[in-house]
Image (cartoon, helix red, strand yellow):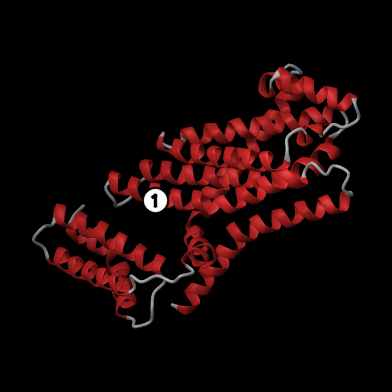
Amino acid sequence: MREAAFVKQNKNKWLKFESLLQNKNKLQPQKLSDIYIEISDHLSYSKTFYPKSNTTVYLNQLAASAHQRIYRNKKESKNRVITFYTKEFPLFFYKFQKQLLLAFLIFALFSAAGAFSAASDHTFVRSILGDAYVNMTLQNIAEGDPMAVYKKMAETDMFLGITINNIRVALIAFSLGLLAGLGTVFVLMQNAVMLGSFQYFFYDKGLLWESARTIWIHGTIEISVIIIAGCAGLVVGRSMLFPGTYKRLTSFTKGVKNGLKIVISTVPFFIIAGFLEGFVTRQTQMPDWLAIIIIGLSLTLILFYYVFYPIYLHKKQLIHE
């Protein structure tokens, strides 16, 4: 890219950064970090292609200013973790809404494919869920307790085991984004097909409501957060395939950091899902209205934190800028 085109493409952004850095009001640590990273990337590019130009000198000064602001704000609040989850991450996540939507659509598509395949081929469920699980569930149905599988393990053991396994799945979905996002799509497909065939299995036995009102007590958060982990993997894959004005390695590094932040955000939700599965889902005798309230609150929590709250914070930030 010619220097003139490089300057024209980024000039307004640099001037905005300069204005923010000169503003005496304290910047949010995440925003300050994002500014510094982007300026450093542009400086690296300029040093490579226009090493002796005024553009490089200007960007070097801008990067130095950002560094000084970071150094001044080095002492972080004692409530750093709380600030991360309540403000920094939701605002940061706003820019990944498209990847979140894509991950959801992929999951929904393959869930439908799993249900359709189970309806078309009665051996499909066994090939996906395994003979042992299907036979055990059929026995539970025959004994009048279709959801007995959630009562077989001790509450605490189940809580810990499920939580650790779900976090493991999330990390796999994220890390397989290294395969240009295809590995993440595979993980989403695998879990979605399993869910679709699982739900059709109970529908075929006339137990769709019984299964849904039980499974989705924990599944609402669990499945949602797997989709969000898939979003993290897609962020990594996109950074490799579409580096934009960055060097591919620089873009990839940013993508991994961004994806890791998204995965870290899911840990509290996986703990909540594990708790619900270990201690609440097994209470199959609870009234339908209580199950519906738990499912509704879980869905509201996920949509608020990952969709509506980021949009709200972004609009609020635009107003104050």
| Of the pair 136 and 219, the residue shown nearer to us | 136
Asked which quadrant contains residue 74, the reply is bottom left
Question: Residue 42, position in %: x, y?
Answer: 25, 58
SS type, badge 1? helix
Q: How many marks?
A: 1
Question: Residue 311, position in %: x, y?
Answer: 56, 64
Number of other residues with Cα within 10 Å of mark 1, as a class: few under 14, some 14 to 19, many 20 or more: few
| Of the pair 24 and 83, the residue shown nearer to us | 83
Residue at (50, 51) in percent of width and height: 264
| Of the pair 120 and 201, the residue shown nearer to us | 201
68 to the left or right of 218: left
68 to the left or right of 269: left
Asked which quadrant contains residue 140, the reply is top right
Residue at (61, 62) in percent of width and height: 308
* Kind of residue indicated by mark 1: Lys
Read off the residue under disc 1: 257
Residue at (38, 45) in percent of width and height: 239
Residue at (55, 37) in percent of width and height: 169
Q: Quadrant of the C terminus?
A: bottom left
Question: Residue 17, position in %: x, y?
Answer: 32, 71
Question: Residue 215, position in %: x, y?
Answer: 76, 40
Q: Is residue 243 visible?
A: no
Tell me if residue 30 comes above or below residue 321 in the rendering: above
302 to the left or right of 207: left
Tell me if residue 153 comes above or below residue 262 in the rendering: above
| Of the pair 67 and 166, the residue shown nearer to us | 166
Asked which quadrant contains residue 165, the reply is top right
Q: Is residue 141 visible?
A: yes
